[in-house]
Amino acid sequence: MRIATWNVNSIGARLPRLLDWLATRAPDVAALQETKCSDATFPWAEIEAAGYEAMHVGDGRWNGVAILSKVGLTPVATGLPGMSEPRYAAADCAGLRVRSVYVPNGRAVDDPQYPYKLEWFAALRDSLDALPATAPQVVMGDFNVARTDADVWDPALFSGSTHVTPAERSAMEELVGWGLTDVVARPGKNDRPYTYWDYRAGRFHQDQGMRIDYVLASSSVLVEDAWVDRDARKGKLPSDHAPVLVDCTLPD
C-alpha cells in the first residue's frame, strides 16, 4: 500500500496539481490538510473521477482536512473531543486506521493559540487510545512542530518562537512514545528531508526549510520505502509544503 500526506494550502488553488500528482504518484490513501474549503465546495466530482473515495471536514477558512482512498473508506471521526476547528479526520481504509491531522500553528508563545495548540495535541494523544498500539494505524499530516534542531534549516533563527519550543516537542514525543514510529525518508531519498519552505526569500531554492509534516505509524505497518516528494513543491503556484509518501505492507 502507498500512503501519503500533503498540506495542499488550498485545494481550490492546487486542484490541477493535486489531480496530476494523484495520477502520477498513485497513492492508495492520501491525507490532505489546509484544504481551505467547506464541505459544500470540496471537489467531490473531480476526486471521484480520479478514482478516489473521499471524506472531508472544513468550514472554508484556513483549515480543513481530507482523506482520499482507492481501497475503500469508512469514516470514523470528523473531529477531536473539545476541539471545534475542522482539523482532524479519521477513517478505516483496507484495514488501516488513517488519521489526517492539521495541528494549529500556535502563532506565538504569548498568543492564546499557543496553549490551544498544546490542548489540541493532548486531545490527539487521547484519541490514540481508541485502538491498541499494535493495530495498523497511521497519523499523518502537518504537525507544525520540528521534532529536533536537525529538522530546521537554522535553529537559531527560530529560537523562542513556536514550532521548536520544548512543550511542542514534548507533545510530539508523547505521540511517538505511545507506540508510533516517525517514518522518515530513507537514506539516499532525501539528504535533508524538509517538508515545508516559506514562499519568501527564495527559501525553497536555497533548501532553507523545516520538517513539520509527518507520517507516524504503528509497529504493524511495515515500511518499505519513504520519501519527500520535492518535485511537487516545484513549478508554478505550488503549495509551500511537499508531500510525504510511504510504501508499506499491512499484516494479513
Image: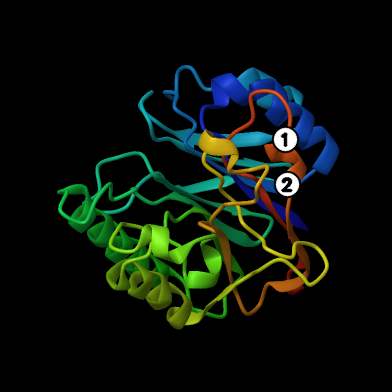
SS for dot 2:
helix
- Asked if one can make out residue 71 in the rendered structure from this viewpoint, the answer is no
Residue 195 percent location from the top left of the image: 60, 52
Residue 250 percent location from the top left of the image: 73, 69
- Give the class, few, some or many, for how many residues have Cα within 10 Å of label 1's Cα (few <14, many ≥20): some
On the rendered structure, is 46 left or right of 87? Answer: right
In this figure, which residue is indicated by the disc labeled 2? 230
Quadrant of the image containing the C terminus: bottom right
Residue placed most toward the observer, 205 or 194: 205
Residue 218 percent location from the top left of the image: 58, 74
Residue placed most toward the observer, 185 or 61: 185
In this figure, which residue is indicated by the disc labeled 1? 234
Q: Quadrant of residue 184?
A: bottom right
Kind of residue at disc 1 = Lys
On the rendered structure, is 217 left or right of 37? Answer: right
Kind of residue at disc 2 = Arg
Q: Are discs 2 and 1 less than 8 Å apart at CB? A: yes
Quadrant of the image containing the N terminus: bottom right
- Give the class, few, some or many, for how many residues have Cα within 10 Å of label 2's Cα (few <14, many ≥20): some
SS for dot 1:
loop
At a point 38% along the width and 77% down the height, the residue shown is 174
- Asked if one can make out residue 181 in the rendered structure from this viewpoint, the answer is yes
On the rendered structure, is 8 left or right of 143? Answer: right
